[in-house]
Each structure stands twice: as structure tokens, then as C-alpha cells.
Amino acid sequence: KGRVVKVTRRVPGVQRFYERYENLRLGEPVPSHINRQWVGDVTFLRVKGRPCFLAAVMDLCSRRILGWSLRRDRTTELTKQALTRALTGRKPNPGCIFHSDRGVEYGGAPYTDDLTRHGFRISMNRSYHSQDNAHMESFFHTMKAEWLRGRSFESIEHLESSIGAYIRFYNCDRLHSGIDYHTPVEYEKKVTP
């Protein structure tokens, strides 16, 4: 009788380029001040049947979207651009937690080096626990349900313009039950000394 053996192949050296971090937010309450915990994630979208990816960074206290980026490819450059835009308007507190999923674009050295250089403590979801980043998942779900579902976009530029309009609405006009029915911008004014 023959015996079938499953052969698996490892890509040697991948760990040199990718780090995994523990979940520093586990059991922690949502912060009561801005710039204490930021979260980031990437979601998949389509333009005329072609894939594109949206990365966003949120301040967990106020739920404000601080920076975002839309590209055809899901790379570290996508997430770095969203982080750079977030840092353009904000200075996080020293030791601010930056939490994300375990995607390679968040664990790669170019990205983690940027986070460390800006004083962030890096935190990642536990394996197979997408709810560890529920606030970002909720934002993407809400954006798709309220703004994108049923609409078609002629180009990535058209989609980018629409996402920009939604994020302005989300930050400045949309009330959030999780922050006492304030907008993120209003809530930041309330909690900032």
C-alpha cells in the first residue's frame, strides 16, 4: 500500500521582515482622552471590478478618523501613507498605543520602525480575533453600509473623492452612540483640557 505524505514548504527568513506583537489593549477600557490609543486597519473595495484597499487610522477615544489612504495595492506604503496623514495633524502622547490586526503591512519593519520613531507602543490583535479591533471594523462596516453600498465608481479617483466626503461627514456631522451622541470633532473639544 502506498502512503501519502503532505509536504509543506516554509518561506525561509520571512520572520526577519515581519514582527508580531502582543495585544496591549486586551482588558483595557476605551481611553478618556485623545492621543492615548490609535487603531488602524485595511479594508477591501472594488472599482469597476478591480480591487483596491483603504487604510485608515482612528483615535479610539473620539472615534475620529485621523488619516487614510486608498491604493490599488495592499502594501506597507498604503498603511504608512495613512499614518503619515494622521501624524500631520496630531502629535500622539508618548507611549500612545497603536493597535492593528496582524496583517503583514502592519508588522513589516518599515511600518513598525515608523511607529517606534514616533513613540508608539505597538499592539496587535490576537490570532483569529478580529473583534480585538472592533472599532475600526465597525467604521468600515458603517461606511460601506451608509455610503458605498449600491453605488458604482468610474475610477479610483472618484472613489477617493467620495471616501473623503464621507470621512468629513463622519468626523464633523455624524453622531455616535459610543461617545454620548456627539460627533468625533465635538467630542474631542469636550475631552480636551
Image: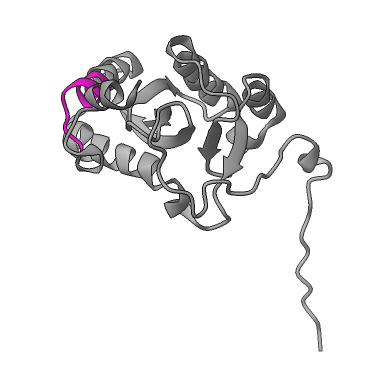
Residue at the location (65% across, 36% down)? 107
Q: Position of residue 148 (x, y in %)?
A: 22, 32
Front-most of residues 51 and 81: 81
Q: Which of the pair 183/41 is nearer the observer?
A: 183
Q: Residue furthest bottom?
A: 1
Residue 76, position as x, y percentages in the image: 59, 26
Tell me if 28 is positioned left or right of 105 in this view. left
Protein image colouring: one colour
Overall secondary structure of the magenta stretch? helix
Magenta region includes residue 191: no
- Residue at 19 percent of width and 22 percent of height: 169
The quadrant holding residue 64 is: top left
| Whether residue 36 can be seen here | yes
Specify start and end residues of the magenta stretch as a single range.
166-176
Q: Residue furthest top?
A: 88
Residue 37 percent coordinates (x, y): 48, 34
| Image quarter hosting the N terminus | bottom right
Tell me: residue 61, above or below residue 158: below
Instruction: Using the rendered image of the protein, determine whether residue 103 is visible from the camera's viewpoint.
Output: no
Q: Position of residue 191 (x, y in %)?
A: 31, 27
Figure check: 116 above or below 107: above
Position of 19 with respect to 16 (left or right) is: left
Q: Quadrant of the C terminus?
A: top left
Is 170 magenta? The answer is yes
**Residue in the image at 17% along x and 29% along y:** 174
Where residue 110 sits, quadrant-wise, is: top right
